[in-house]
């Protein structure tokens, strides 16, 4: 490499280091070490390989860059600023401050060019796997000979912490299995974590582990050697059938004479004195936030390059659109993130049926009914497809032999599944879904929280939703899970009461393009309500609705229920009626949708003057107090379940018509007769 | 091997198979395939290697057996029955029925000989790692030359699902690092999961992966070859410095002519016809639950063997007790599961201090104060020890060079940490603790649920408990986490308000020997309350207590708060008092402890006639309705946080004295003045 080029590269790399360190110093908090150590690899990737357009972060075929080690956000912001995204230097100076575009960890939707919210470790790797899966599916669906409309790479930068987290194992194993050759991981192997040297806890053979996952593995021993880095990335690109990991030996806090290779460089400012010494070491000017003129020019070439890259792609796309107008239209429509008009025309109407069917079964029927009209609906289960009824029939399995398959086989990997779904949603164009038993939603809580925070359309199908699981016992019986899912801000949780409410739940989930939806479904059969006798299932879209009430009378008592317990409320209403008590049954499948209704509607469904109320749900009583008020009663289960046939459990734990009736009478201050 | 031995072994193995299949068949639900496939390895392990005493499942130095693939419970019950535990054949016939000793998944504390509740996949491997860690620590603490009082092996049987789960990666990587040579994993490599062949999703090189984790790896190609199995287990025992995994190629549903090697053998009864054919294939008598006389005799040798094993050990222990009486006493005391009298004598009293300190810092001080008196208190953090203040100073790191170290370096592996803590608690004698940021409790929810279900004394130290985290932003700020921890039945959640409440929280956690406790601590400083002016911190033990009230008056309004928000309630009470309003401040650090108080006490703290109430907590409002009633008000946060200095966030999100005062006045129907 010639001398001049070497010098400007060094300037660029040091400028990244110093900007990132300045940001942390000014904010008086943050993580300077990672950006300083990883600056060279970031520089090489962003200036020589990454195909992106700073002028249009939404260019659909851009390469994706995921900073899994999200605490290194100042590195990402520095790169975005330098390469000309709409992120001025002033924003770097407002790092971690109220209202700034530069929060402590990268936040999707908040800062132009940030592809994904990261910070909770390990998930970024799985998000990247999701983006790479999306690329293969979209490419397979849309590309035609000479028209590689979709052919982006997904790059992920990950640290020791990411690799220690179990989700990295799950996602990497699956990525190797799926032969995601366009996924490239740069592993920032700095051997320092918060507690100190990784020798304290993390001595596995990382290269061997990824080789075992069927990845292409390379090492770069000097993380500041730009040519070696470039060669490795080139080789990774050349490898078509395996995802690549490059183990890059770096030094945390590189350039800081006293903190380099120390845990103290990880998560706190270097301090004024050490900043001064670092400037000296890196021969850097004294004032903070200095941007070298040459460096600025060098990086800003990305603006022109990006424009030209997108223009070239646009030209290709225009030509493609001429040859394949329908496909091109579809592509545009998918990217809009709105389902095509009429997508729901095949949703079936389930006839009234006392025997009925499990809502998981109804869900499977609905999924298959809508699948043809929504070819961008793609998903699968964590090895529970037959139980969760989430196979799209005839759509094939997604895999190296068939990237147009729509059934994803996640394996028993819930955490990776959740994070991969996020990556797929972030990639654009797809509506991803994932399924497991409700009790195992605990395994994937971290990515569900992120989906909600990012406002991603991801659909969770959680079946086996209560003690109705029966014989599998308490380890498999959700008790607290409705409560803890409802607790995630921005997650819509729907527990339909019968087959037609299940159809409506799918309608809501598909229409809910700005956030995740969890569908909570039974293992056991539920009667399909006779909608001639009760209100239409469309009421579900308002979260809660008057399903039935004693005709011609103001209700004496309100019976609130969700899912499998609605049938108890219905039967109890009948019995109460026989005793001369007017009952109103409110089906309440979704609290979040109900809370979003106008107050007038809410007061109409739950009239404030009616204080006699009973809620019935086979889960924690927690939370229902707000709907039943001080005088109301709640039939729930505040302890773990047991192993026995479901019918016995419901009875033993008080989920009987009799118990609802007794509680209704008590809330009316009536002593039930024997 | 001689013919006769071979024949009786085959009989034994087939008897296991048929009993397990009969159980599932009679229950009309369950998992016959795994027991049928793994019967031979279970037989070899249980009859030739496992040192246990069916007459005393609590013999402390027994080998531990963990069935990580808990759905194969009928295998375990069959082994327990056959080897003479207190589990009669009638219980096998009541498999999965209400009130039986044979629930769908093994439940610790419910069935004699079941070491751990399993079912949620992957965790069993990590539980076993915890048991093996406990063994090393106890051995290191108690053993003396010629006195290997503690030297048990931990065996774990795991399936494909276990190995797919991320927690298996985390735990195995750590086990290799820690060189847990007495941990032996039998991997039931049957290549079938629920969705079908593991080729659909799980094609990694499992042997290579465990080699990368620094494990000793062997293969047994024929899982029915008892001699090869025995040789492999012997070799695993001989390997002292690495944990061992034996990849045993088995066939799910072995013996079933039409279902062997099929997913259909996994999770449902074989069916009457196939049962008949299986009997024919295995040359087995027609009646269900048949136990061959020779088989019974063969297995029941375990009763005598076990007795003699324990007697031999007891003799050794008696001699040890003569030489090391203090150590022997201590060992007995640890195993009792009760802290030694006077353990809490060094808990410090923190002086009143307006500046105060973070409750995480107070926790660190308390931990170190009690550590000397509780040498069986051992734990660590998921790479956040400096932040969570959970290092026991001078106690050394637990590791291959020093198994007497008390500081566990879990690495960034929260899920494994939680499951390992469970294993350590199950091993007996230890009080394990683990720490991370509260927001990352999501990563370890599955094992926390299991700790609660098993009633294990495990202590979680969760710091950085709210938007008080500040600049790290929404990914690191818990919002919903108090709600979702309180939702786990049997988990005690304590959020102390100052340093002295933190000390009391530790007291509760150590005294709470029958279940897990989560301590919720601040990152930021909190004033240390002047206990001359407010009630003593001992009130924490009742869950909620009257911290302060306007002297000499019945309160007009109740202010309920936890943790960092208690200071707001205190300041608001002052201001209200200035306006002539009598306020009572109730510090409410632990709902579970409060709910366990007599009603009289609860009514005394929260008098039902006082309807004007305000609750303040920097978390979801969810759940507080039950304490503030219909008329009360809740100051909480029902959305994700933001990245900015903590002080700004509290202000922006309404956690101010002024807002508490305004809400108090509104609940009293007073319009606050401008």
Image (cartoon, coloured by chain):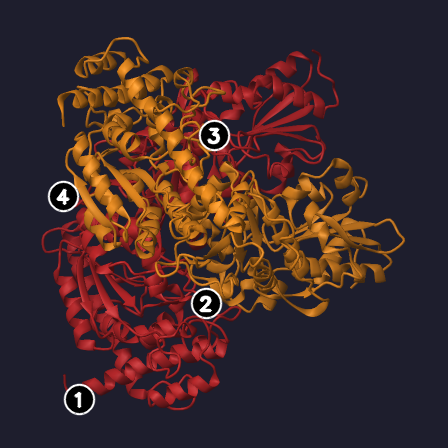
Chain colours: A orange, B red
Crowdedness near tag 4: few (<14), some (14–19) or many (≥20) residues, C-alpha within 10 Å: few
Crowdedness near tag 1: few (<14), some (14–19) or many (≥20) residues, C-alpha within 10 Å: few
Q: Position of residue A288 (x, y in %)?
A: 31, 11
The first of marks 1 and 2 along the sequence is 1
Give the structural element (helix, strand or loop) at label 2.
loop
A427 with respect to B399 (left or right): right
Q: Which residue is mark 3?
A: B466
Chain of the residue under label 4: B
Per the model, the C-alpha gap separating discs 1 and 2 is 37 Å
Chain of the residue under label 3: B
Is the Cβ of the residue at disc 1 closer than 8 Å to that at disc 4?
no
Q: Position of residue A18 (x, y in %)?
A: 27, 18
B141 with respect to A154 (left or right): left
Q: Are marks 1 and 4 on the same chain?
A: yes
- Which residue shows up at 27% across the image and 76% down it? B40
B11 w.r.t. B373: above or below: below
Chain of the residue under label 2: B
Per the model, the C-alpha gap separating discs 2 and 3 is 39 Å
Quarter assignment of residue A569: bottom right
- Which residue shows up at 26% across the image and 26% down it? A33
B340 w.r.t. A355: above or below: above
The first of marks 2 and 4 along the sequence is 2
Residue B3 disc label: 1
Give the structural element (helix, strand or loop) at label 4.
loop
The first of marks 2 and 3 along the sequence is 2
Residue B104 disc label: 2
Residue B401 disc label: 4
Quarter assignment of residue A358: bottom right
Per the model, the C-alpha gap separating discs 4 and 3 is 38 Å
Of the two numbered discs 4 and 3 in the rendering, the one whose residue sits closer to the viewer: 3
The first of marks 1 and 3 along the sequence is 1
């Amino acid at each position: 490499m010639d001398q001049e080029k070497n010098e400007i590269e060094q300037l660029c790399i040091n400028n990244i280091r110093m900007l990132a360190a300045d940001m942390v110093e000014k904010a008086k908090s943050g993580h300077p070490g990672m950006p300083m150590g990883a600056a060279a690899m970031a520089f090489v990737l962003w200036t020589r390989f990454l195909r992106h357009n700073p002028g249009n972060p939404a260019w659909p075929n851009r390469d994706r860059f995921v900073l899994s080690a999200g605490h290194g956000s100042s590195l990402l912001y520095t790169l975005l600023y330098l390469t000309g995204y709409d992120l001025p230097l002033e924003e770097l100076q407002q790092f971690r401050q109220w209202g700034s575009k530069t929060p402590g960890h990268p936040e999707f939707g908040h800062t132009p060019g940030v592809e994904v919210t990261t910070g909770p470790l390990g998930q970024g790797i799985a998000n990247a796997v999701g983006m790479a899966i999306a690329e293969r599916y979209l490419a397979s669906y849309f590309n035609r000979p000479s028209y590689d409309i979709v052919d982006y790479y997904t790059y992920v930068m990950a640290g020791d912490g990411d690799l220690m987290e179990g989700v990295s194992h799950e996602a990497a194993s699956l990525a190797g299995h799926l032969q995601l050759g366009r996924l490239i991981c740069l592993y920032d192997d700095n051997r320092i974590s918060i507690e100190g040297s990784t020798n304290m806890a993390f001595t596995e053979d990382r290269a061997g582990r990824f080789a075992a996952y069927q990845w292409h593995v390379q090492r770069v021993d000097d993380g500041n050697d730009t040519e070696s880095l470039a060669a490795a990335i080139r080789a990774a690109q050349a490898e078509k059938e395996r995802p690549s990991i490059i183990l890059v030996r770096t030094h945390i806090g590189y350039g800081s004479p006293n903190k380099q290779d120390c845990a103290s460089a990880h998560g706190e400012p270097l301090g004024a004195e050490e900043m001064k010494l670092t400037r000296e070491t890196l021969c850097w000017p004294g004032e903070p936030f200095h941007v070298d003129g040459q460096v600025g020019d060098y990086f800003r070439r990305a603006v022109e390059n990006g424009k030209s890259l997108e223009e070239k792609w646009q030209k290709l796309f225009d030509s493609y659109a001429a040859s394949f107008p329908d496909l091109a239209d579809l592509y545009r429509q998918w990217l809009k993130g709105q389902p095509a008009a009429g997508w729901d025309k095949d949703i079936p109407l389930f006839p009234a049926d006392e025997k009925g069917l499990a809502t998981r079964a109804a869900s499977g029927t609905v999924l298959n009914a809508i699948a043809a009209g929504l070819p961008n609906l793609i998903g699968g289960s964590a090895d529970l497809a037959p139980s969760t009824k989430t196979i799209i029939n005839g759509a094939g399995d997604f895999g190296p032999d068939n990237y147009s398959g729509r059934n994803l086989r996640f394996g028993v990997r819930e955490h990776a599944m959740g994070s991969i779904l996020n990556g797929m949603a972030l990639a654009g164009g797809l509506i991803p879904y994932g399924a497991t038993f409700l009790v195992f939603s605990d395994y994937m809580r971290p990515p569900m929280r992120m989906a909600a925070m990012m406002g991603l359309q991801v659909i969770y199908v959680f079946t086996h939703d209560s003690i109705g699981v029966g014989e599998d016992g308490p380890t498999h019986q959700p008790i607290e899970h409705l409560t803890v899912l409802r607790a995630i801000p921005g997650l819509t949780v729907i527990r339909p009461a019968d087959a037609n409410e299940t159809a409506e739940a799918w309608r809501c989930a598909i229409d809910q393009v700005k956030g995740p939806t969890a569908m909570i479904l039974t293992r056991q059969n539920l009667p399909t309500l006779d909608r001639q006798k009760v209100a239409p299932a469309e009421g579900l879209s308002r979260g809660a609705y008057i399903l039935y009430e004693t005709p011609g009378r103001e209700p004496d008592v309100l019976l609130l229920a969700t899912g499998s317990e609605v049938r108890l409320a219905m039967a109890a209403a009948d019995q109460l009626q026989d005793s001369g008590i007017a009952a109103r049954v409110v089906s309440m499948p979704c609290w979040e949708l109900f809370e979003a209704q106008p107050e007038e509607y809410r007061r109409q469904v739950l009239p404030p003057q009616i204080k006699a109320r009973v809620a019935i749900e086979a889960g924690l009583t927690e939370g229902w107090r707000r709907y039943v008020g001080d005088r109301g009663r709640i039939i729930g289960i505040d302890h773990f379940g047991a192993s026995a046939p479901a019918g016995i459990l419901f009875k033993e734990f008080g989920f009987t018509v009799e118990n609802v009736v007794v509680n209704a009478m008590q809330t009316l201050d009536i002593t039930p007769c024997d």
